[in-house]
Image (cartoon, rainbow, N blue to C red):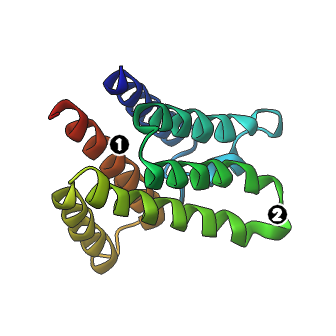
């Protein structure tokens, strides 16, 4: 059942990113989609992050670090509504991704995924890839979801 939750999370993640890219072009970050969606539909961004986080928690509920990481990502979905506290949005995102990647290494023995993530991150930064925050977020999410999936199917 855990693998189904992760496949759903991955499908929703790829579908959302593809949809916003097709609709609005390459955005500076995934979070930027909140501001491009029509005001009456901006809640979709928050629901997207909450659903993905809940699916990952459901797949890994006994792993505290990844649960904390998902709570942080859920916070990312809340804080675009508070423009004067935008720094909290960024703090939650950075903390969520960092704890998630640490959990991949410690809890899911996915150190090789983290090394791959760091190599891609270094390339993105050194090559000055356009929309680098967007790509860093995409690679971080994919690294976390795929590494947990690989860990679960290997057990």
For label 2, the crowd category at 10 Å Cα-Cα, with few meaning under 14, some 14 to 19 and many 20 or more, is few
From the viewer's side, name the closer residue of 93 and 27.
93
> Position of 21 compared to 117: left or right?
right
Residue 93 spot, x, y in % from top left: 56, 61
- Which residue occupies 85% across, 69% down? 84
Residue 75 spot, x, y in % from top left: 67, 53
- Which residue occupies 45% across, 62% down? 99
User: Looking at the picture, does residue 76 appear above or below residue 120?
Assistant: above
For label 1, the crowd category at 10 Å Cα-Cα, with few meaning under 14, some 14 to 19 and many 20 or more, is many
- Circle 1 SS class: helix
Residue furthest to the front in view is: 62
Q: Quadrant of residue 102?
A: bottom left
Q: Quadrant of residue 56?
A: top left
Camera-nearest label, 2 or 1: 1
> Position of 96 compared to 6: left or right?
right
Residue 95 spot, x, y in % from top left: 53, 66
From the viewer's side, name the closer residue of 65 and 141.
65
Residue furthest to the bottom in view is: 126
User: Looking at the picture, does residue 5 appear above or below residue 84?
Assistant: above
Q: CA distance from mark 2 to mark 1?
A: 29 Å
* Quadrant holding the N terminus: top left
> Position of 5 compared to 49: left or right?
left
User: Looking at the picture, does residue 28 appear above or below residue 3?
Assistant: below
- Circle 2 SS class: helix
Q: Is residue 22 visible?
A: no
Q: Is residue 56 visible?
A: yes
Residue that numbered label 1 is attached to: 145
Q: Earlier in the sequence, mark 2 or mark 1?
A: 2
* Quadrant holding the C terminus: top left
Residue 62 spot, x, y in % from top left: 43, 41
Pointers 2 and 1 in contact (CB under 8 A)?
A: no
Residue that numbered label 2 is attached to: 83
């Amino acid at each position: 059942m855990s693998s189904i939750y992760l496949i759903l999370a991955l499908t929703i993640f790829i579908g959302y990113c593809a949809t916003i890219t097709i609709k609005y072009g390459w955005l500076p970050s995934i979070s930027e989609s909140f501001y491009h969606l029509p005001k009456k539909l901006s809640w979709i961004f928050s629901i997207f992050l909450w659903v993905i986080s809940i699916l990952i928690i459901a797949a890994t509920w006994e792993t505290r670090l990844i649960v904390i990481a998902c709570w942080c990502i859920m916070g990312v979905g809340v804080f675009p509504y508070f423009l004067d506290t935008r720094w909290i949005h960024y703090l939650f995102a950075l903390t969520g991704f960092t704890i998630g990647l640490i959990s991949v290494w410690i809890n899911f023995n996915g150190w090789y995924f983290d090394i791959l993530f760091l190599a891609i991150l270094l390339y993105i930064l050194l090559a000055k890839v356009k929309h680098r925050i967007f790509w860093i977020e995409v690679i971080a999410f994919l690294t976390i979801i795929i590494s947990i999936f690989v860990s679960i199917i290997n057990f």
